[in-house]
Image (spheres, rainbow, N blue to C red):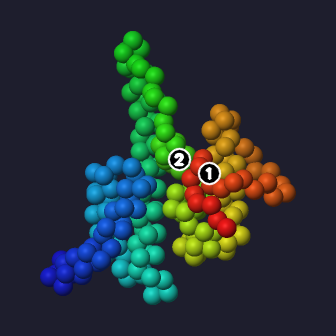
Amino acid sequence: MSRADSQQISLLFNQHGPRVYRRALRLLGNPADAEEATQEIFIRAFRAAGSFRQQSQMTTWLYQITTNYCLNLIRDRSRRTALHDEHVAPMADEATRTEPARPDDLVLIRRLLADADERQAAAAVYVFLDGMSHEEAASVLGVSKRTVGNLLERFQEWANAKISGGAEPPTPPAPPPPERKPFGFLGFGRKRS
């Protein structure tokens, strides 16, 4: 890496590092994981600098990289946990096991995001966790506001079925629009006027 490259990475990090770290911390919930993710995100951003389209702002591009990277980490952890539970946990002594504590809402949402459809999960993160409007989320995702609404509706239906212990619901024909709930999902998101 040349000196000029190092200076570019340093400048990019100084300008956007705190924002990327806060985003990673919000999604991952652990400062150490957020720090590691932030470093990896800037390495990936530098390597992919040629794919940056001048049509969007640098912050939007980094925001997408951060969201995708963190969602992938969450999914990978979920897979590792499932493999551990399947192969290692049965070998543990039954007498030493304790029941896990009921997770709080953020942990529940992270688990749901790990299993959710990638596009639905991204829309849910932007709207429910970040409090973006449908228009803002549509801009970041590169889709229409209507598509964001459809993604969120499908995510909520799927997540509610998972939470209630049911299997993944089949995809029914488009039902009439549901009654509007006060706001958010599991109390997340901000009320829009």
- Identified at 66% across, 61% down, the residue is 151
Amino acid beneath label 2: Ile
**Residue sitting at 47 percent across and 43 percent down?**
107
Give the CA distance from mark 2 to mark 1. 10 Å
For the residue pair 61 and 177, the one nearer the viewer reads as 177
Residue 89, percent across and down?
A: 41, 25
Q: Is residue 136 left or right of residue 26?
A: right
Tell me: residue 82, above or below residue 129. Answer: above
From the top left corner, tell me how far across and down residue 143 is, in percent: 63, 73
Q: Quadrant of residue 15?
A: bottom left
Q: Earlier in the sequence, mark 2 or mark 1?
A: 2
Work out whether residue 101 can be spotted: yes
- Identify the residue at the far front of this view: 193
Name the residue that disc number 2 marks: 109
User: In which quadrant will I find the C terminus?
Assistant: bottom right
Q: Is residue 187 left or right of residue 38?
A: right
Report the residue that reaches farthest toward the top: 95
Circle 1 sits in a helix, a strand or a loop, which is it? loop
- Quadrant (top left/top right/bottom left/bottom right) for the N terminus: bottom left
Circle 1: residue type:
Phe
Label 2's element?
A: helix
What residue is shown with label 1? Answer: 185
Labelled pair 2, 1 in contact (Cβ < 8 Å) = yes
Q: Is residue 174 visible?
A: no
